[in-house]
């Protein structure tokens, strides 16, 4: 399939600009690696027409050309002054998250919880510096070992939090002095997460939690995920759980989840919408997540409704939501809590209640809204077009009802079939099936090249011939991947098909075509983001950042400063993490200088058949001072 594809002439260059980018960057079979600032030059091959990429295979022949190439490269690099390397920031900034300066927010008058909200406008820039790792920082263990055991020096957590972590989905143990162990998959089930998950499955009428996928539940938004154990368990069932929690200075749930290699980002129910379109998730889960759901006239419940797909589930486990009467038959109860009352008004039906767990189902029938009885019912939104929602104020109306994406979760094909999208589903997104197929094919072969690049070998002055002795980097070499301009989520799909042990945060930059609804409908994780602003995550949370065409997009729109973006990329990258950029020559030149400023190891890779594009592969070193 792949070799067949590699020989195809590429058509339709005009139809889709992002696809064109990809073709230009990856069709090439031979790539030249140029070592700037070093005295040698080597040339590497990437042949993707065979099942295993044959790296370096025409090494000798190409070596003969190296002298001439070197002269060219040297003249290219003449006149480039060596960029000044940035210093490490002060220790106080080692856990710095821009846009969340609680004291500054408080000082300008935000209160009632709004001081914990995202306020980038109040985030001072400060002197440019590289956020340093804590003194005891250690490179995390690889997946799946790193899911169950983390280094305590890598996260900010207090002794008290250990002692008080008794609740379900939150239990942990101090193993050795410098390690924290979470209940492991094959462990003793000490935290009851498996039982809890089975209970939820039974409550929605399934035989066991292994049937979630058949029931249409693939993506879960876990609000306030504790230490991520529920998501970790669902992950083993092939569900994609994204954890969100408000910014926390100590023991952040988001930081802990990401440290374990589980999808998470900072996000909160305070005054603004989450940066997801409507109809995004199959299930929203909150176990003692600290949100007072009947506050603000139900605006938080309306936000849950907005991001829930039709027929999706809202699971709430909370002692406070317990109704006064504990009659077994919920339907016959007259005592409804305010939440239950409101749920009816927005066409949610209470499926079941057991102990402290309540499960509502959002209606699959769009006609439900018009048949509601009058009274204080939230109206349908007049301008129902919130797919570009980027931290807009919370709504008091119901959205998504006029969307073409109104498809009950129970009506979809089952995972994993639906990440490939049927022609009908693509039509809903206005995407031509041919474009989509090409995109998938290109990414499949491109991934081989990418993966072979993720080795410090490519930075050495005298690359060995790997041949048989140097296999490809292992499947679990990296875990947390961010595609900074994810387009259709093609890199994510290719990684999934190649069975790499990664998950991908698919970021769709605002002011580009909004493909996030498509990405989420494929069952992937994703978010809208403005790359002129910091990303809502803690430092050292991603193993690889990938961006194709993003830099030239940002430079063209002249909206923000690229060097600030590079500092931000450094902040969110783990030590020894990777950056892969594909862009125009001039842009990559600029990026290379910024990479040097950030003290990253970097290689520019020239692509055959295309003098206008370059690949820049960088690795962040583990700097201690
Ligand atoms: C947060 O804001 C306070 C008050 O404006 C300021 O003194 C402090 O330096 C800020 N902290 C950071 C990390 O920017
Ligand atoms: C979902 O499936 C049911 C049963 O097959 C069908 O009656 C219903 O019309 C479908 N709904 C939508 C929106 O496709």
Image (cartoon, rainbow, N blue to C red):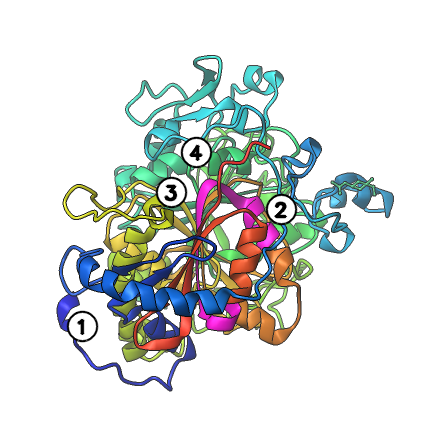
The percent coordinates of residue 13 (x first, y second) are: 34, 84
Residue 398 magenta-drawn?
A: no
Q: Name the residue under label 2.
A: 268
CB-based contact (under 8 Å), mark 3 and mark 2: no
Residue 311's disc number: none
Give the spatial CA distance, label 3 vs label 4. Answer: 9 Å
The percent coordinates of residue 395 (x first, y second) are: 66, 61
User: Vertical placement of 443 versus 190: above or below?
Assistant: below
What secondary structure is found at the residue carrying circle 4?
loop
Give the spatial CA distance, label 4 vs label 1. Answer: 37 Å
Q: Nearer the viewer, mark 3 or mark 4?
A: 3
For the record, the magenta segment spans 566-588
CB-based contact (under 8 Å), mark 1 and mark 2: no
Give the left or right position of residue 286, taking residue 103 as reference: left
Q: Of marks 3 and 4, which one's residue comes earlier in the chain?
A: 4
Residue 578 magenta-drawn?
A: yes
Q: Residue at x 31, y 27 (%)?
A: 185
Give the spatial CA distance, label 1 vs label 2. Answer: 44 Å
Give the spatial CA distance, label 4 vs label 2. Answer: 21 Å
Give the spatial CA distance, label 3 vs label 2. Answer: 25 Å
The foreground one among 32 and 171 is 32
Q: Name the residue under label 3.
A: 479
Q: Which of marks 4 and 1 is in front?
A: 1
Q: Nearer the viewer, mark 3 or mark 2?
A: 3
The percent coordinates of residue 308 (x first, y second) are: 48, 56
Residue 260's disc number: 4
Q: Residue at x 71, y 42 (%)?
A: 116
Q: Name the residue under label 1.
A: 5
Give the left or right position of residue 102, taking residue 280 as reference: right
């Amino acid at each position: 399939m792949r070799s067949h594809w590699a020989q195809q002439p590429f058509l339709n260059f005009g139809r889709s600009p992002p696809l064109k980018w990809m073709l230009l960057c990856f069709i090439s079979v031979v790539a030249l690696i140029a070592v700037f600032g070093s005295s040698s030059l080597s040339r590497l091959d990437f042949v993707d027409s065979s099942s295993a990429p044959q790296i370096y295979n025409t090494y000798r022949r190409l070596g003969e050309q190296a002298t001439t190439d070197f002269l060219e490269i040297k003249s290219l690099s003449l006149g480039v002054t060596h960029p000044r390397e940035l210093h490490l920031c002060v220790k106080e900034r080692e856990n710095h998250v821009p846009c969340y300066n609680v004291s500054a927010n408080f000082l300008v008058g935000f209160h009632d919880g709004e001081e914990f909200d995202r306020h980038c406008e109040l985030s001072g820039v400060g002197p440019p510096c590289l956020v340093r790792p804590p003194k005891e920082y250690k490179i995390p263990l690889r997946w799946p070992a790193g899911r169950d055991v983390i280094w305590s020096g890598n996260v900010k957590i207090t002794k008290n939090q250990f002692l008080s972590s008794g609740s379900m989905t939150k239990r942990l143990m101090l193993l050795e002095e410098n390690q924290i162990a979470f209940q492991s998959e094959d462990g003793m089930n000490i935290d009851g997460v498996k039982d809890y998950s089975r209970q939820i499955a039974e409550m929605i009428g399934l035989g066991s939690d292994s049937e979630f996928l058949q029931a249409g539940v693939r993506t879960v938004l876990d609000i306030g995920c504790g230490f991520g154990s529920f998501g970790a368990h669902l992950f083993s069932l092939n569900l994609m759980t994204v954890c969100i929690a408000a910014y926390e200075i100590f023991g952040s749930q988001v930081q802990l989840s990401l440290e374990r290699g589980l999808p998470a980002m900072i996000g909160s129910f305070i005054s603004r919408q989450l940066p997801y379109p409507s109809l995004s998730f199959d299930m929203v889960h909150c176990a003692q997540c600290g949100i007072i759901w009947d506050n603000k006239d139900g605006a938080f419940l309306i936000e849950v409704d907005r991001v829930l797909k039709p027929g999706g589930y809202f699971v709430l486990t909370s002692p406070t939501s317990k109704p006064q009467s504990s009659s077994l038959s919920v339907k016959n109860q007259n005592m409804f809590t305010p939440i239950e009352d409101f749920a009816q008004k927005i066409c949610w039906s209470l499926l079941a209640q057991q102990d402290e767990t309540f499960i509502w189902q959002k209606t699959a029938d769009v006609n439900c809204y018009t048949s509601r009885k009058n009274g204080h019912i939230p109206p349908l939104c007049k301008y129902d077009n919130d797919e570009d929602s980027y931290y807009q104020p919370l709504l008091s109306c119901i959205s998504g009802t006029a969307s073409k994406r109104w498809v009950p979760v129970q009506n979809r094909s089952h995972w994993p079939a639906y990440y490939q999208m049927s022609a009908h589903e693509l039509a809903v997104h206005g995407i031509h099936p041919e474009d989509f197929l090409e995109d998938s094919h290109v990414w499949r072969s491109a991934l081989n090249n990418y993966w072979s690049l993720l080795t410090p070998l490519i930075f050495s002055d005298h690359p060995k011939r790997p041949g048989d002795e140097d296999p490809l980097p292992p499947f679990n070499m990296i875990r947390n991947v961010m595609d900074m301009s994810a387009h259709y989520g093609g890199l994510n799909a290719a990684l999934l098909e190649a069975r790499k042990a990664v998950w991908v945060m698919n970021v769709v930059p605002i002011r580009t075509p909004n493909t996030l609804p498509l990405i989420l409908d494929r069952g992937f994780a994703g978010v809208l983001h403005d790359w002129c602003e910091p990303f809502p995550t803690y430092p050292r949370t991603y193993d690889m950042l990938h961006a194709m065409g993003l830099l030239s997009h940002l430079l063209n729109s002249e909206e923000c400063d690229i060097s600030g973006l590079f500092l931000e990329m450094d902040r969110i990258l783990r030590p020894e993490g990777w950056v892969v950029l594909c862009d125009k020559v001039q842009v990559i030149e600029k990026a290379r200088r910024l990479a040097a400023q950030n003290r990253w190891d970097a290689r520019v890779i020239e692509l055959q058949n295309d003098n206008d594009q370059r690949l820049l592969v960088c690795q962040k070193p583990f700097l201690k001072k």
